[in-house]
Image (cartoon, grey):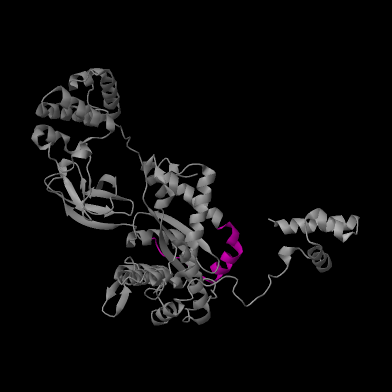
Amino acid sequence: MASTKDTQVRKLMKYLSQDNNLSKGAMRVGLDRKTARKYRDGGKLPSQLPPPAHDWRTRENPFERDWAQIEALLKETPRLEAKALFEHVCDGHERRRQELLDEGQHEEAEAVPRYAPGQLRTLQRHIKQWRAAHGPDKTVFFPQLHRPGEAMQTDFTVMDSFGITLGGEPFAHRLCHCVLPFSNWRWATVCLSESLLALRLGVQAAVFRLGKVPRYHQTDHSTAATHAVPDGRQFNDDYEAFIHHLYMEPRTTAVGQKEQNGDIEASNNAIKRRVTQQLLLRASADFADLAAYQAWLVEVMTRANAGCIDKLQQELDEMRVLDVRRLPEWTELDVKVAAWSTVRVKANAYSVPSRLIGERVRVRLYEMHIEIWYGGSRQLTVSRLLGHGGGQINYRHIIASLLRKPGAFARYRYREALFPSLVFRRTYDHLLTQQPERQAELEYLRILHLAATTSEQDVEAALSSLLDEGQLKDVEQVKALCGGAEPALVPEVSVPIVDLSAYDALLCGEVTR
């Protein structure tokens, strides 16, 4: 935006093109005649002229008296910040002022400098200028030339600040982000943690999409890739085996030197800006489910890569064809089902059908979910928990036993899992107001058993209606509204037997054209 003087000079030039009277023109635009002549003869706007040079202070330095002390401290301890120095100087003056007052030297006490809080900014500017002129040398960073097809950099970036929700529920997650530095082609995969599973998921998603692999795979010193040893850090065996399987060589940045992964760090910021803009255009950060969010992210990444096709082709021409199988993106654990119908996986508890109590089951641990297998068949799939000490309990797995032992309900460790929705919680609270606690608990468990053996949605709708009318007393009322609520029957499916004799005859040459 042009300054006021620019506007005045433009008006002056326009007036002089019509009437070459400098005095009148200067008067009309509000300029001094000498100033108007300078701009007329120079032919430039004020904003186009260099600022006047001078080597004198335009204002008195308020820290002149203390600058020698401040400079000495800066030389002795270069890492000191202006705010700490400001507070140090102010505290020293306050102590000196108090000493003089105690000695009765009031005039001398008044002469001790006082600094206003707003003068901190002035000191920061002075220190910045001193450091530029006299301070220690700074670390120099050297831009690197990237060779096509040489390396892929991978890093994790946290996405919690975007407010992504799945079905209205907050979704805390990260992206495993891979980039080819030469072309800036990048790919991102949703993950929950910075584990080796997440790294395997993200890297395989990227390289199998490309169909080729570079020579090196580079990460920082995350625990997914490295671990501490007495003389530094070294690669984890599983990570190294994974990278070698893809015919890449692992390499890392130096410890504490994340700028050596500068391309992926910059790409993280670029991806976050792009996600921000696409969410603004979408006008919502809520997605129906994880699959919908992942599909949307694929579209975002595809559009982000549209501008680097030519340079990507140069990379692909130099990269090795990916001719290996995709490794499983899970790990397997053998665990025993505890007496409380749960398995413990990575310090979290998951309920399983009670028929499996005492059996050893195989757990497939994925980044986003876990699967429970027994006897070669999958028994259960549940979303994976993060952290430690959590529990994911399905009330259907335990309600039959709990109905036989209702006394366990009151202090059950995972009792909150026995309220599938707010309506069920309201039901329990309402029953407590209508009858003694033990009876209310038993009645609630009967209602929960009804939901487990019939339809949770139908039971919830019946409960909501009864609560609104204030008529809920027992499970029989709920059954009546659910039409008797008979247990759902699994339909019998007739699987036809396929006669393959015609194919056998064909193979044996018995069928001719």
Which segment is the magenta one? 305-326
Q: From the top left corner, tell me how far across and down residue 510 is, in percent.
A: 41, 46
Q: From the top left corner, tell me how far across and down residue 110 is, in percent.
A: 41, 68
Residue 274 visible in this rendered orientation of the protein: yes
- Foreground of the two, 315 or 300: 300
Q: Is residue 320 magenta?
A: yes
> Is 433 left or right of 138, judged from the image as shown?
left
Q: Is residue 354 magenta?
A: no
> Is 77 left or right of 141, judged from the image as shown?
left
From the viewer's perspective, is residue 206 above or below residue 452? below
Residue 247 visible in this rendered orientation of the protein: no
Number of marks in the image? Answer: 0
> Is 10 left or right of 293, judged from the image as shown?
right
From the viewer's perspective, is residue 142 above or below residue 281? below
Q: Residue at x 25, y 57 (%)?
A: 332
- Foreground of the two, 231 or 68: 68
Q: From the top left corner, tell me how far across and down residue 199 is, in percent.
A: 37, 62
Q: Residue at x 14, y 27 (%)?
A: 440
Q: From the top left corner, tell me how far across and down residue 181 is, in percent.
A: 51, 68
The quadrant holding residue 43 is bottom right
For the N terminus, which image quadrant?
bottom right
From the viewer's perspective, is residue 443 above or below residue 499? above
